[in-house]
Image (tube, rainbow, N blue to C red):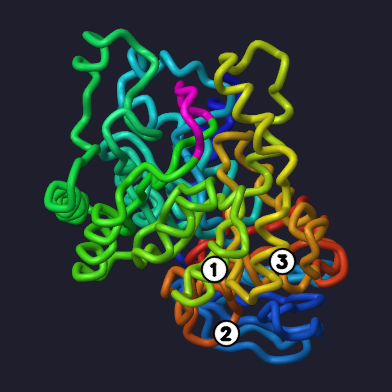
Amino acid sequence: MRQLRAALTAVALFLAAPALADTQVIHAGRLIATAESDMFGPATITVVDGRITDIVPGVRPAPEGATVINLLDKTVLPGLIDMHVHLSSDPGGEFWREAVDPDEWGVVVGTRNALTTVRAGFTTVREAGSAANVGFVLRRGTAEGVIPGPRIVAAGPALSIVGGHGDVTGFREEVLHALATNFTCTGAVECAERVREASRAGSDVIKITATGGVLSQQARGLEAHFTTEEMTSIATTAHSLGLQVMAHAHGARGVEAAAAAGIDTIDHGTFVDEAAIRVMQQRGTALVPTLRALTGVRDGLGRGIYTPVVESKIRETLDHLGDNVRLARRYNVPIAFGTDAGVFPHGQNAQEFQLMVDAGMTPREALASATTVAARTLRMEREIGRIARGFSADMIAVDGNPLTDVRTLEQVRWVMVRGRVIP
C-alpha cells in the first residue's frame, strides 16, 4: 500500500506541474547521443514543446524565459526501451486471482508500475499482454500526461490456442466457461478474425503465445502450439493491417515455426538452436531475450509461490540462461532489449543489461539493444532511441559511463519523457 500511496502522490505532483515549458535547456556534463557514438561533454541540449531542437558542445546560455536543467555532474543518454513488460502484473501472483480481481484493478496496478518503470529510466515499453482494455487505457493515460509513465506500445490481450499458454487454465471446467475470453482461435480463418478484432480494439502490436509457457498451469511442454497455417495467417493478416507480431516462444521448433511464418520478434527464445536461429537470420526476425525473467522466477523456487507443475518448468529453463543471446550474436540476429517485467518486480528492468553482458554482449551492444536496435525493431527509429534534432525528448541521466559499466544504468538519477521531467 505504501507503493500505491507513493504512486498517487507522484500523479498529483505530475498533474500539478505546469504544462510543457516552451523551451527547456539541459546542461549535460557528459553526453551519449547514441549507443554507437562516443561519450563527450559538456553539452547543451535544447527542447521545445517536447522535441529536441538543438545539441551543441559546451555550456551555452539559455534564452530568456527558458527552464534550465543542470546535469553537469551527470551522463545524459537516450531513454531506454523495454520490448516486453506486463505493467498490470506483479510477480508471484496466484493464478486463481483471475477469478477474483476485476480487469479494472489492472489499471490501478499498472499506474503504479508505469511510474516505477519510467523512474528506472525506461521511457518506452512494449506492453506484452494485459486484460481487455487495460493496456490501452494506460497507453492513453501516459500519452495525454494524465499519469506519469513511459510511452506505451500496447498489445492488448495475447492470442493463444484453446487451453494454451495465455488462455484461462487451472480451474474446474465450469469456471473456465465462466471466465472464457475471446482471445483464442482454431484454424487460419478464425485466427485472422482475432487479429482483425485486436486491430479494431486498438492493438499497436499483435501478441501471440506461439509455444507453451513456463508460468501457465499445464504440465505440457514448451514447444509449438499454433499450426504453421495458423501462425502464417496471423502474420499475414497483421502485416496487411500495418501491425507487427510478437511471439512468446520458448521451444526451438516453436521458434523456428514462428520465424518461418513471418513473426517479427521472438520473445524469450529460451531453447533456440542453430536450425531455429538460421531461420530467424534469414527472415530478419529479432530476438527479445528476457533473461531477467528466468532469474526472477528462479528466486521464487521452493518458497511456495509456484505450483509444482510450474516449478518443474522453471527448473527446465535455468540451464539455458543466456544461450539465446550467445547464439543470436553468433549469427548476427538483432537482439532487442526486453525483460518480461511483471514476472519479477517492476523497476529492476536494467538488471537485464548485466545478464546480457554475462552472455557475451559488450556494454555498447547491450545499450544499443535498448535504444537504437529496439527503436528500429519497433519501426520508431526516427522518433526514439537517440538524442538527435527532431526526436522526442526522451532522456535519462546516470552517474557513470554505461559504455564501460552497464550497471550504472541500474541507478537512474533523472528522467524526461516527451519533454516532461518525471517526479
- The residue under the point 49% across, 35% down is 213
Going by the numbered disc 3, the residue's amino acid type is: Ala
Q: Quadrant of residue 58?
A: bottom right
Pick whichever of labels 3 and 1 is earlier in the sequence: 3
Question: Callout 1 environment at 10 Å: few (<14), some (14 to 19), or many (20+)?
Answer: many
Q: Secondary structure at mark 2?
A: loop
Task: Give residue 124's position: percent from left, percent from top.
Answer: 50, 59
Taken as a whole, is the magenta stretch helix, strand or loop? Answer: loop
Going by the numbered disc 1, the residue's amino acid type is: Ala
Task: Give residue 74's position: percent from left, percent from top.
Answer: 81, 67
The reply to whether residue 32 is visible in this rendering is yes
Span colored in magenta: 215-222
Question: Callout 3 environment at 10 Å: few (<14), some (14 to 19), or many (20+)?
Answer: many
- The residue under the point 41% across, 15% down is 97
Label 3 and label 1: CA atoms lie apart by: 11 Å
Q: What is the number of the mark on residue 366?
A: 3
Q: Which residue is mark 1?
A: 374
Q: Is residue 392 magenta?
A: no
Q: Quadrant of residue 274?
A: bottom right
Q: Nearer the viewer, mark 2 or mark 1?
A: 1
**Left or right: where 88 falls relative to 5:** left
The reply to whether residue 393 is visible in this rendering is no
Q: Secondary structure at mark 1?
A: helix
- The residue under the point 72% across, 15% down is 302
As displayed, is residue 320 above or below residue 259? Answer: above
Q: Which residue is mark 2?
A: 388
